[in-house]
Image (cartoon, helix red, strand yellow):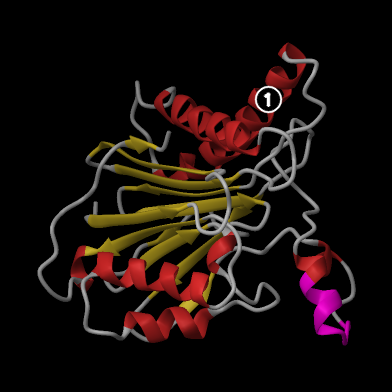
């Protein structure tokens, strides 16, 4: 399996509390799992929802580790991860009847050997980064993407990007599981990955590839690069929590980089 150095930042930003949670899990040499969950702002218990989702991800993944995991299992594991996360929230709502609603996004990447798949519900994102480009791999589940995109008003478009059409909220909303047709994608030597909550994205009506790529070209360490991305987002108007995970393919190491692959659950 190709080796990755993993870096992360999770900032409260201008909010009172951080409702993002994340998971960086490297349980075996042949498996790396990354996930970001953003508790839905303005709703009850967003921080609890994202934590429950991430804890469910870990439990589900570990349930597959008592046997050999093959690349062709990637999609079925991802589907189970999302199904169990929905069930976790559903059970929590049944247990605490005073809570009328709670929800979160979930975007995750599963690498097995030198192959990978990914999935998402909501508007947290996954980007693939190469020497030549930054490519958005997920599709935001927002109202603006669900209807005719021929909306001229920038204000209307921006407001509609904040309304989610799918979430991990105890419902039966289904994730997008990728790649679309193949069972998995193969990792090339120059491919790295970035996951983020939507607080990093200033203009949510675009892929925002250019500003990520411009920062990437700067001659600073990966951790400094992530810190700069977050500071730039806050400076330019982000009023949300910001969580970013960067999985740097060892073949793309640029300066003195210290290995930081860890197993971690925020909170």
Q: Position of residue 254 (x, y in %)?
A: 17, 76
Mark 1 — residue? Answer: 87
Q: Would you say residue 155 sits in the magenta stretch?
A: yes
Q: Is residue 191 visible?
A: no
What residue span does the magenta drawing correspond to?
150-158
Q: In front here: 192 or 221?
A: 221
Secondary structure of the residue carrying numbered label 1: helix
Total marks in image? 1
* 200, 32: nearer the viewer: 200
Judged left or right of residue 26, residue 168 is right
**Location of residue 142 with respect to 170 vertically, above or below:** below
Q: Is residue 49 above or below residue 105?
A: above
Q: In which quadrant of the rendered view does residue 258 lie?
A: bottom left
Position of residue 82 measured from the top left corner of the image (x, y, whole percent): 62, 37
Looking at this view, name the residue that lies furthest to the top. 95
Which one is nearer the viewer's eye here, 89 or 87?
89
Q: Is residue 50 left or right of residue 122?
A: left
Instruction: Name the image quarter holding residue 90.
Output: top right
Residue 161 is a magenta residue = no
Task: Name the residue at 28% across, 85% down.
Answer: 218
């Amino acid at each position: 399996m190709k080796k990755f150095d993993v870096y992360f930042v999770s900032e409260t930003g201008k909010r009172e509390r951080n409702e993002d949670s994340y998971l960086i899990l490297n349980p075996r040499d042949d498996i790396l799992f990354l996930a970001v969950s953003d508790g839905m702002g303005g709703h009850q218990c967003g921080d609890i929802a994202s934590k429950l989702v991430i804890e469910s991800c870990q439990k589900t993944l570990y349930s597959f580790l008592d046997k050999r995991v093959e690349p062709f299992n990637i999609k079925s594991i991802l589907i189970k991860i999302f199904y169990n996360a929905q069930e976790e929230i559903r059970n929590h709502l049944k247990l605490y009847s005073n809570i009328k609603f709670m929800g979160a996004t979930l975007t995750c990447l599963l690498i097995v050997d030198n192959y990978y798949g990914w999935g998402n519900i909501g508007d947290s994102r996954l980007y693939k980064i190469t020497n030549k480009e930054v490519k958005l791999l997920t599709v935001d589940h927002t109202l603006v993407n669900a209807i005719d995109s021929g909306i001229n008003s920038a204000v209307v478009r921006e407001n509609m990007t904040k309304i989610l059409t799918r979430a991990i909220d105890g419902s039966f909303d289904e994730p997008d599981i990728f790649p679309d047709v193949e069972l998995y994608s193969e990792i090339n030597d120059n491919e790295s990955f970035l996951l983020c909550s939507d607080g990093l994205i200033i203009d949510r009506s675009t892929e925002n590839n250019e500003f990520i790529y411009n920062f990437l070209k700067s001659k600073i360490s990966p951790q400094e690069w992530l810190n700069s991305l977050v500071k730039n987002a806050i400076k330019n108007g982000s009023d949300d929590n910001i969580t970013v995970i960067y999985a740097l393919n060892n073949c793309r190491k640029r300066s003195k980089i210290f290995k930081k692959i860890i197993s971690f659950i925020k909170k």
